[in-house]
Image (cartoon, rainbow, N blue to C red):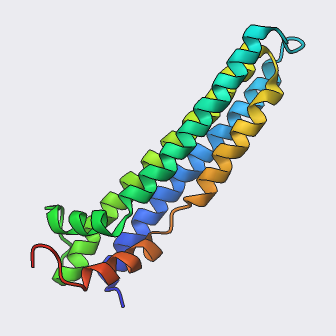
Amino acid sequence: MLSPALVDATDAAAQRMRVIWAALCGSVLLYVGVLYLIRQGPPESDAAAQVLVLSAYLQSLLVAGVSLAYRHWALSEARLRRTMDRLDGPELPGVDRTEGRLYRVLGHLQVVDVVGLALHESIALFGFVLAFLTVDPARILPFAALAIVANLLIFPRPRAMLEHARNLAQLPTSAG
């Protein structure tokens, strides 16, 4: 069972992360709306446009892969243990050493989420630039869909992540 102080801190962090998450998901939808509002003509179909399209798709797939690999690495058991052992972050009054370590991990989890959201945002931006340059707003749709799906996969669930970290924290650490 988590202490009331850690539950309150987790709930506050979750609220902040959900606001950031909603803002970045909303910005992807805003890109789609802007492109449909400023559409100026028919899409171009020359060879240069096809190279641009292929390049944007490849870059987006690369960023999606990097995002998944980063999240897997950053949330690995070894990485979370090192984070709990090394961070000299703020302490919460009235919590034991284990929960103090969990509180320090909360900041790490927030960084992991923000990095993932930023990478997903860049996928939407690739689509935005492609749609803008080819004057075809529909070109953003697969990029926006990929960014939104990726964001849904990392919806902030700090309590579940802290529960996982708590299980790790109760095991002996490299320092002790």
Q: Is residue 53 above or below residue 142?
A: above
In this image, 110 relative to 132: left or right?
left
* Whole-percent x, y for residue 40 in the image: 84, 12
Image height of 78 relative to 24, above or below: below
Residue 101, position as x, y percentages in the image? 22, 73
Instruction: Left or right? Give the position of 41 relative to 6.
Output: right
Quadrant for the N terminus, please: bottom left
Q: Quadrant of residue 62?
A: top right
The single residue placed furthest to the left in the displayed view is: 176
Describe residue 174's horizontal placement relative to residue 170 as left or right. Answer: left
In the picture, measured across the screen, residue 27 lies left or right of residue 9, that is: right
On screen, residue 89 above or below 34: below
- The residue positioned 76% from the left and 17% from the top of the image is 50
Circle count:
0
Position in image of residue 168 (x %, y %) = 30, 79
Q: Is residue 137 visible?
A: yes
Residue drawn 72% across and 22% down?
53
Q: Where does residue 134 sit, x and y in percent of width and height?
A: 77, 15
